[in-house]
Structures are given as structure tokens and as C-alpha cells.
Amino acid sequence: MNVVIIDTGSANLGSVRHALTRLGVVADTTCDSSKIAAADRVILPGVGHARTAMAELERAGLIGLIGSLTQPVLGICLGLQLLYESSSEGDVDCLGVIPGRVEPLNAGEGLRLPHMGWNQLEWRNNNDPLARGLGPEAWFYFVHSFAAPVEHAVATCCHGDEFAAIVRYRNFAACQFHPEKSAAVGARLMANFLLESRQQEPLTCS
Amino acid sequence: MVAVRIIPCLDVRDGRVVKGVKFRDHRDMGDIVELAERYRDEGADELVFYDITASPQRRSVDVEWIERVAAAIDIPFCVAGGIRDVVTARAVLSAGADKISINSPALERPALIAELAEACGSQCVVVGIDSISEQGRYRVRQYTGDPDNMVDPRTDTERWVVEVQRLGAGEIVLNCMDADGTRSGYDVAQLGAMRRLCQVPLIASGGAGEPAHFLEVFETADVDGALAASVFHSGHIPIPGLKRWLADQGVVTRIDSTISETETAAGVG
């Protein structure tokens, strides 16, 4: 299977690559648009600042390409946030694949920011391919201060506000947590993504 | 709800894990990757690797072992010791660490915290603070990795806790030196006092000896995580039992759900 990790210049690229290696997949980390377009699976990772990451994608000439991909794409952490129309982190326009805007997490009284640590999900769609083998008892590792709205969420999480933990839109899926750092359950989620059938692609993306 | 974090701290010297008492008399505890894997399997929520020689000797941290750890384990880990510029921080993060922790270099030059937060994001910038009780006040200590080079930076811990957050620290690890190595419990009075000044996650360090000490620090000082070394390395407190017991006491704790081997995606490639 030909899996590519989009080189967003962010620091967690190596961790994502290692996680895939542990699943038996050697992934190419690249910003070469022809390699990305030809891949069976595309992963959009990211940590850090939305504005910096968008500038990096702009510089690499990938902004139009990512939205036009038709194979299964998985965004991770900031990669999820970049799929939305805009982010209030740096007040920046993002890739515009998923409707909505990323806003600061409102943790409320007694909760710390960043939302850093292991948390559980509330599944809204247990039938999503990413949900296979993962119940409500599974713990995932989060590190973030901004979050996406719940409209297109397959699973949500709460840290004060409820926010999108896993989203799915057309052939795009994304998770706010770090599956590459979420021990066995994270590995299972990444394996679910790799095993996802291309037939999941809806008919709308012709 | 976000779970409390149980964090084994592995002191690293010359590529091996070591442990001393009150920062002295270091004993060899084993290979870094073997211990990291053991703790991951036991349910540690995160690991901290502290290069105890890098800071006092003004050496930069060696990234070779960081890459080995990152390839092997799938839980977050933080690297501390010897990081004093953005270039080194980026190298450590690129090697696979999730967070970097700075202590003495932040006291040397507080602007470093802001530079790292700007370059790498606050979420991966941890500030470690070594604090000692002195004439009724909490005071910061510097270069504690080497008792002969330890420095008193003449700073109140409260002031420093506020300042590092203003500069962009995403997490604080407070090591209470009076308790460290004693196994008589975390310094909950000091941790509770700092908790009230802390909007970012606060991790307790120093003094763990019994499971009850973990319960006490989570319930009394409301910390987000508790770090310990010797009680985990020696096997005195097995992590699976500790976490189950904490969960039974009502502490929100990550108990790893089991995924059967046949269900994992062997042969994905």
C-alpha cells in the first residue's frame, strides 16, 4: 500500500511515520504533489500554529491539491483543524474542505489549557470505519488549545466545551487526538484508516 | 474527562537510565528503550527522559537515543536537560519527542521560553522548576543535576511559576527538592500553593513512596499528573496496580482497554 505523509514541516512527522512502520507500512514523507495525488492513502499531520502550517502548505503549492484528493485522507491534530474553512488561531483561512471554523477551546472553571492528556470519546456513529474495535472505554492522547465544531463529528470529546474528536466529510477523516501517541487504541485507529475501503468514497466527489 | 497522568521519569546518563537519591549517588537502572517499552506496556501515560549530565556540563542533548525511543514506543514522551536554544529543541522534537522541558537554561535566559513557544508551540514547551523550602519561602534552585554546581538564582518559586506562564510555558513540572528521594509523599502544601497560580497543566515531582501519596497529590493539590522514578524502577509500586487502585478511589485514570491481538491490523502493509 502506497501511503504518504504530507510534509507540513511540523515536528510530529517522525512519530506518524514510526507508527505506520509499526503497522508494517513504509510511508513516504513528502510535499511532492504528484506523489501525494498518486497515493492510496494520504495523512495530513500537524502540530503547532495554524497560520504557520497554512503558510507552509501555501509555499509547497499544496492548498488546491489537498482539497481535490479523492483517496482516503486522514488529518491528525492540527491536520484536522486545517481541513476546516478557517481558524481563529492567527485568524487564517484554511483548506476549506469541511464547513466550519476552528475556535479556541473554552475549558471553563478548574480545567487547564492546553487540553493535554488522555481522554475518552463519545461516538456519534459507531459504524464509521474508524470506530472498528474501539469502544467508549478507549483512551486517546490529546494536546490542543483550539478545536473544531461538532457538526461533522463521528466522535466527540469534552474539555469544558464539547468538540469534534473524529470528523468525517467526503473522503476526508480526521482526528483531534494523536493516534500515533495513543498506544494500542491509536494503532488500531490508524490500522482502521489503512484498511478503510475506497468504496467509502461517496458519490459526491466526482 | 481528561485523566490524571502517571509519569515515570527516567534519568539518563551516557545513554543509560540511572537513579540517585537527592540527586546524588547514581545507580545504573538499565537500557533506555527496554525501560521505555516496559513502562508503556504497564500503562504509563507519558514518560520523561531527563539527561542529567547535559545541563550542568553545558552539553547539548544527544538525539540518537531519542530516535530509538520514538521508533519503539507509542505514548508521549518529554526530553529534558541540555536544551538551551530553538535549534536543539527542534532537533529533539524532530527526533520524535513530543515535548521538551527546560529548567536551568530558562533561568539563565527567560526569553528562551518565549522563543521556544513561538517556534514550536506552547503545547510542547514544559518548564521544570526545582524548588526548595527556605525560611518559610519557596525558592528556585538551578543546576540541581550536579550538587557541586548548584546555584541559587535568588528567585521565589511563586514569581517564577507566574513568569514562565506569561512567557509561554505549556506545562510546569514542579520538583519539590525537600521531598525528592525521601519516599515520604509529595509536597502537597507547596504543590497546592502553586496550583492556584497555574493555568497550564501542573505535574508533581519528588517524594512518591506509596500509592496513597499519588491519591493525596491528586485529591489535595489537584495536579494534572504525578511523576516518580525510583518507586517505579524498583518495582515497589507497579503501575497497573497503582492505576487500578486510583480508579477505584474515584480518580479519573486511564485503564488501557484491551484490544485482542487478532483484532489488530497485522498485515496491513
Image: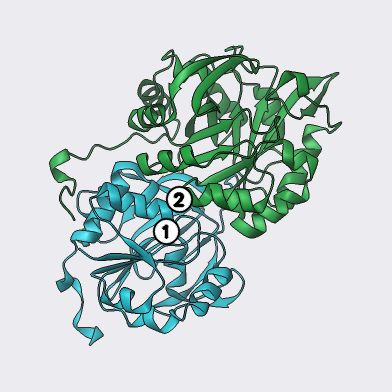
Across and down, in percent, residue B227 comes to 54, 28
Q: Position of residue B224 (x, y in %)?
A: 55, 37
B92 sits to left or right of B265: right
- Front one among A8 and A97: A8
Residue pictured at 63% horizontal, 53% vertical: B87
Q: Which residue is mark 2?
A: A142
Dot 1 amino acid type: Gln
Task: Give the numbered dot on residue A176.
Answer: 1
Q: Position of residue A174 (x, y in %)?
A: 36, 64
Q: Amino acid at mark 2?
A: Phe
Q: Is residue B74 left or right of residue B194?
A: left
Q: Secondary structure at mark 2?
A: strand
- The residue under the point 37% across, 82% down is A65
Q: Does residue B139 lie above or below A57 as drawn?
A: above
The quadrant where residue B249 appears: top left
Helix, strand, or loop for circle 1?
A: loop
